[in-house]
Image (tube, rainbow, N blue to C red):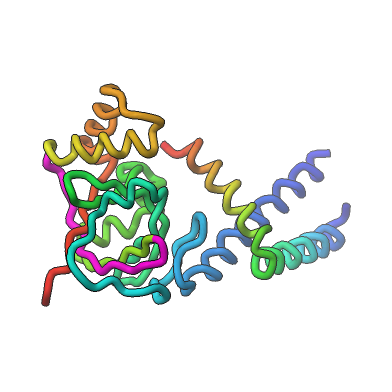
Amino acid sequence: MNNATYLKLCGGIGLVWVLGLLFVPPFAELIESLMLLFLSTNAS
Amino acid sequence: MLKLILQIVGLLLLLLALTLVTLKLKNQNADGPSVLFPGGALVSGELYQGAEPDWSFTDDVFTIELQTTNPDSSRRIFVMESGGKVYVPSGYMRSFLGKLWKDWAFDVEAGSVQAVARINGVRYERTLKRVTDPAVIEGVATKLAQKYYGGVTPEAVAQISQSVADGDTWIFEMAPREED
């Protein structure tokens, strides 16, 4: 994948990701729960 | 192949950064915390006024929302009743994660002791006081083990008490609000 395509892909996925976090509460809660699971099992 | 792996790692790091920034900004002024990210001031819910409650009802409450001030921020936190008083813990206090995550506890220790607890939709104005007395801690540790560590065993209570004594876990009493 060339750099231009990669940057466009990152921008597109990033935009969808942020909109999902902002406007789809179950998605945001799922991501938070996964982060909490990671932190609670790796915190030291 | 290496380029593709680096691109995937870069995308994952981008998503992680976007998640942290987005959820932090989204929640910082919200009426209460999310699962992981702090919220703002607790504004909804009846403000309790009256005699000191019988805090034993918190035995059936898994987490409460606790707002501290200067700055106004709120988070979900465990709650333990012991000896007629009510307490909240803050763990990981000597870890790198704790220093990032538990800034509210350091703020309380530095003097921002005014707090609001929202429990079952009712807000209680309280003052946070750090507790280190081993006699008090034993009762709190017992309740902490009972509610959150799968049961009371001498080992669990001793481990929690040691964690408090070592400064890894801080225990705050949510005392009645002192009049100015």
Which stretch did the figure color magenta? B120-133
Q: Quadrant of the C terminus of chain A?
A: top left
Residue located 68% across and 58% down the image: A27
- Specify whether B28 is left or right of A29: left
| Of the pair B90 and B146, the residue shown nearer to us | B146
Q: Give the x, y percent position of residue A29.
A: 61, 56
Magenta highlight on residue B123: yes
Q: Quadrant of residue B32?
A: bottom left
Residue B155 x/y as whole percent = 29, 22
Q: As displayed, is residue B123 above or below residue B1?
A: below
Q: Residue B109 location in percent, x, y?
A: 21, 57
Rendered residue at 81%/44% (across/down): B4
Is residue B19 placed above or below B95 in the rendered structure?
Answer: below
Identify which residue is drawn at 44% across, 62% down. Answer: B38
Majority secondary structure of the magenta segment?
strand
Of A30 and B79, nearer the camera is B79
* B8 on left or right of B104: right
- Closest to the observer, B84 or B23: B84
For image coordinates 71% across by 69% down, the residue present is A19
Q: Residue B111 at what x, y percent from top left?
A: 18, 64
Total numbered labels placed on residues in the image: 0
